[in-house]
Image (cartoon, helix red, strand yellow):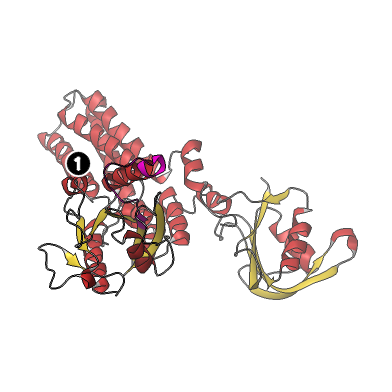
Amino acid sequence: MDTIFALSSAPGKAGISVFRISGPKSLLLLKKLTRESHFTPRMCYTNNIYDFRNGKYDLIDCAVTIFFAAPKSFTGEDVLEIHTHGGNAIKEILTEVVLNEPNVRYADPGEFTKRAFLNKKIDLTQAEGISDLIEADTKLQHVQAVRQMSGALQKLYSKWRNITVEIMALLTALIDFPEDDVPDTVLTNISQMIKTLIRDLKSHLSDNRNGERLRSGIKLGIFGAPNTGKSSLTNLLTKNETSIVTHIAGTTRDVVVANINLEGYPISIIDTAGVRESVTDLVEKIGIKKAKDYFAKCDIKIILADPTEQCFIPEELKQMQDNNTIVAINKIDLVENYNEKDTISISCLKKLNIGMLIKEIVNKAKTLAYPTHDPLITRSRHRVAILKALNCLENSLQEQDFVIKAQEIQNAHEYLKLITGTIHIEEVLEKVFKNFCIGK
């Protein structure tokens, strides 16, 4: 197996850069780079590191080095970490020196974590948790990622797999020894174990997709007629000039997306084109169609209305409202004593009641992606596999033939194994690791 190398810290100038090496040549590279011969694993050393090409040993930097001997390392292989000063020239020279060594190459994205999985240091759900931890932008995302990285999902799915093994063992005994008198309690126990497992899987699936929303972000769309202040509200929420604002109706022609953190909830704000009838401009027509399409896709919808207009909410948007729709009346600074039931009155210009609107958004977010103490499904591939396992369990409960019943339990067992990666399927591995950063 090749030895892999990568810069694990962010590119660009910094105070410190961290390099990682994993594979059979890790210790040899450490000795060649430092001109030292003895290293105690898991101990920090301060060493000069040299460009040993051509035998010149030109000084590269004074670095901190740590060697982790297999199998007590992140990847399960010999691993070397080198902490240097963060100058670009140091990074360039050290990279050239290391990659000049035979059978050493630059790591693929996520390859360190992939090797940890292949060497049984972690399962697939933990690998995904590591990826989510790196990508986490909010505290709630961080909590969920840490829980998954620490093995919460792995323990739950392993428990279910062990139950299917126990059921298969009992069914195998019934199949292999049909002439023996089998207590009625055995069949009763099998049925009860299957029912309990079905109940647990259904409970796990009835999560309102909280974990997936918390991981990927809650979609918040801002909709309404032209010139109601949708782009102004977007800019207020993002605290940035995200959208172009003018007094001209129809300024926003396409969807504008920006990500924010509201009290720990990851929110993707989507500013859309104003919805109105009798449009002749082709580009604006496309923008309006996109706005209507996004209304159905968004988790939370804000319909923004202008009280100075006679028909201030487009009829099509009225008909599409649901429990996660907030109707906000903008420009209340232009009218006196305005009060409309089940709405929030705001002024983007004067920044009136924006905090009240944010509070309502957070309340909606809590119902869509609330954190729990129980591990949550965070990816669609988990949900698909659990649904298939559930279907097999329900089939087995109805089946009277012990052989077919056992096969259905076996199938459920295989689907659960697929989630944690006990079955090595390259297509699944590629999907899990392709979005990792290089060096992790």
Q: Is residue 175 above or below residue 432?
A: above
The 10 Å Cα crowd at callout 1, few under 14, some 14 to 19, many 20 or more, is some
List x then y, in percent, for residue 116: 53, 52
Q: Is residue 158 left or right of residue 428?
A: left
Residue at the image point whose x is 14% and y is 41% from the top: 192
Instruction: Residue 284: say if magenta.
Output: yes
Q: Is residue 139 visible from the viewing direction of this image?
A: no
Depth check: give the residue in front, 315 or 281: 281
Q: Is residue 262 left or right of residue 174?
A: right
Residue at the image point whose x is 20% and y is 58% from the top: 309
Q: Is residue 245 above or below residue 425?
A: below
Instruction: Residue 151: say if magenta.
Output: no
Depth check: give the residue in front, 173 or 61: 61
Which image quadrant: the C terminus? bottom right
List x then y, in percent, for residue 267: 34, 60
Residue at the image point whose x is 78% and y is 59% from the top: 97
List x then y, in percent, for residue 233: 32, 64
Residue at the image point whose x is 52% and y is 52% from the top: 436
Which image quadrant: the N terminus? top right
List x then y, in percent, for residue 184: 10, 34
Magenta extent: 269-285
Mark 1 highlights which residue? Answer: 198
Q: Is residue 437 left or right of residue 51?
A: left
Depth check: give the residue in front, 117 or 274: 274
Secondary structure beneath dot 1 equals: helix
The amino acid sitting under disc 1 is Ile
